Image: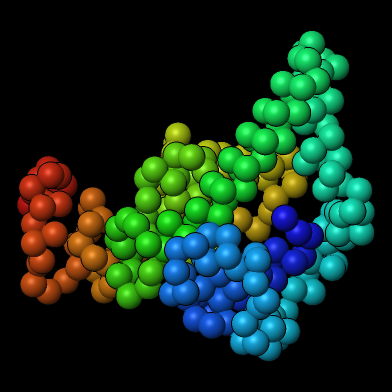
Amino acid sequence: MNRISHWVREHRIHHKHVDTDADPHNSLRGLFFSHIGWQMMKKHPDVLTKGAKINYDDMSADPVVAFFDRHFGILKPLLGFILPVVIPVVFFGQELKPAIITQWFMRYPYVVNTMFSINSFAHAFGYRSYDKTIRPTENGFLSFITTGEGWHNYHHAFPWDYKAAELGSFFPNRCTWWIRLWSKLGLAYDLKEAPEHSIKRIVERKGDGTHPIWIPKGDPSAQVEEVIEEHPYMYMES
């Protein structure tokens, strides 16, 4: 786990150079590397070279980001390890040992690995409903365990859409609900969404045929026919 500005830079270069040597967690280097191996190895020279060209001045201009970056050495252990143990012990009567076990050795590895799974499993397993030419996928299970981050093919097809999914804010995408709440509180702003006509156009041009409403133009594949059989009411002509 690192500073906010560092994460933003890594995420931006990941999107700009996805699954190339300039991608910090290039999935073409294998499942282990894209999951956690990239954290254990020196960065590829392309990551350093092209990463240096990524502009993230907006992060240094943000007072909240600047505060967290400046006090990262204190805030990381405080928010990540100390308070998660102190709160259940002081306010809920939890014993210290179980609190440490559950918060340090269960919660933290779970959160880290579910987050890393988007870099690894969501680039390997699932549908490519929006763009079959890229490796990121739509994975409902990952969306469930990460509260909405597994709709990764959509996220890479429309990276500016704050929802990171076409689905809105129902159960598998609770991250969207939180962003909307922060927006109402004035903590998030300038939220952008991909318009429906753009989504439809991309699906028809690049989708793999698994989108539940629209299908690629041209000769339908067997996969498309299976989708139509599963959702016939969506394709009935009026």
Task: Please say if 127 is above or below 49.
Answer: above
Question: Quick check: 120 left or right of 182?
Answer: left
Q: Quadrant of the N terminus?
A: bottom right
Q: Residue at x 77, y 22 (%)?
A: 97
Task: Please say if 202 is above or below 52.
Answer: above
Question: Quick check: 143 left or right of 202?
Answer: right
Q: What's the image's color scheme?
A: rainbow
The quadrant in which residue 21 appears is: bottom right
Q: Residue at x 26, y 74 (%)?
A: 205
Regarding residue 71, the answer to whether it shows in the image is yes
Name the one closer to the observer, 237 or 121: 121
Task: Please say if 78 is above or below 1.
Answer: above
Total count of labels: 0
Q: Residue at x 77, y 41 (%)?
A: 80
Regarding residue 201, the answer to whether it shows in the image is no
Residue 233 percent coordinates (x, y): 12, 43
Q: Residue at x 37, y 73 (%)?
A: 134
Name the one closer to the observer, 133 or 39: 39
Question: Quick check: 238 left or right of 74?
Answer: left
Extreme top residue here? 93
The quadrant in which residue 206 appears is: bottom left
Question: Quick check: 111 left or right of 208?
Answer: right
Name the one closer to the observer, 152 or 27: 27
Residue 150 percent coordinates (x, y): 45, 51
Residue 86 percent coordinates (x, y): 84, 25
Residue 52 percent coordinates (x, y): 73, 84
